[in-house]
Image: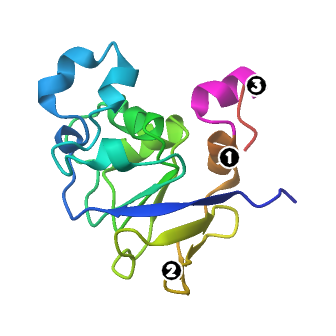
Amino acid sequence: MMPDTILKGRAFKFGDGISTDLIIPGKYSHLRSNLPELAKHVMEDADPTFAEEVKSGDFIVAGRNFGLGSSREHAALVIKMAGVSAILVKSVARIFFRNAINQGLPTLICDTDKIDAGDELEVNLTRSIITDLTKGIQLTFGKIPKVMLDILNEGGLISYISRYGDFTL
């Protein structure tokens, strides 16, 4: 049995319809070849203070249809580079979800209504439990398949393939 994968951090709350254009503002598209600089502007159009305030381990918590829009894998990558350990959403665009897993960024589908901005959260990826330490409540999300959990634990698909060379399904 694999050990539990636990993430801890603060919640940054967003609403519905956070597009890849809100994640990576178009005015910074020239920075796509300089991802560390681009990460300094992540979520800027949705919350101008986010990139300055987010700390390693924190969470993005949002509503429905997170990551809609173009299939830019940079959107998930710069969120991860900014220090976000996971995204908790009511629903997510399929291509963003796949890009996030490939980049090693857990994107969990759950009821985010009870989580407020600033709440301290603990997420157990192995047991599919979110504990809001601020409110003393627990939420659940769908079980992450083992292969996806292995990809996340390796830091993304490239790291996984580099280490194992193939999938064991």
- Residue under numbered circle 2: 134
- Mark 2 or 1: in front is 2
- Which amino acid type corresponds to the residue marked 1 in the rendered image? Val
Choose between 16 and 114: the one closer to the eye.
114
Is residue 169 toward the left or the right of residue 39 in the image?
A: right
How many badges with numbers are in the image? 3
Q: Magenta segment range?
A: 154-164
For the question of whether residue 2 can be seen, the reply is yes
Label located before the other in sequence (2 or 1): 2
The structure residue drawn at horizontal position 62% and vertical position 36%, both measured from the top left corner, is 155
Q: Position of residue 151 (x, y in %)?
A: 64, 40
Question: Image point 70% across, 63% down: which residue?
Answer: 126
Dot 3 or dot 1: first in sequence order is 1
Which label number is shown at residue 26?
none
- Mark 1 nearby-residue class (10 Å; few <14, some 14–19, many ≥20): few
Residue at 38% in and 82% down: 114
Report how far apart the C-alphas of labels 2 and 1 lie in the structure.
Answer: 32 Å
Q: Which residue is mark 1?
A: 147
Pointer 3 residue: 163
Q: Position of residue 135 (x, y in %)?
A: 49, 85
- The first of marks 3 and 2 along the sequence is 2
Main secondary structure of the magenta stretch: helix
Q: Residues within 10 Å of mark 3 (few under 14, many from 20)?
A: few
Q: CA distance from mark 3 to mark 2?
A: 38 Å
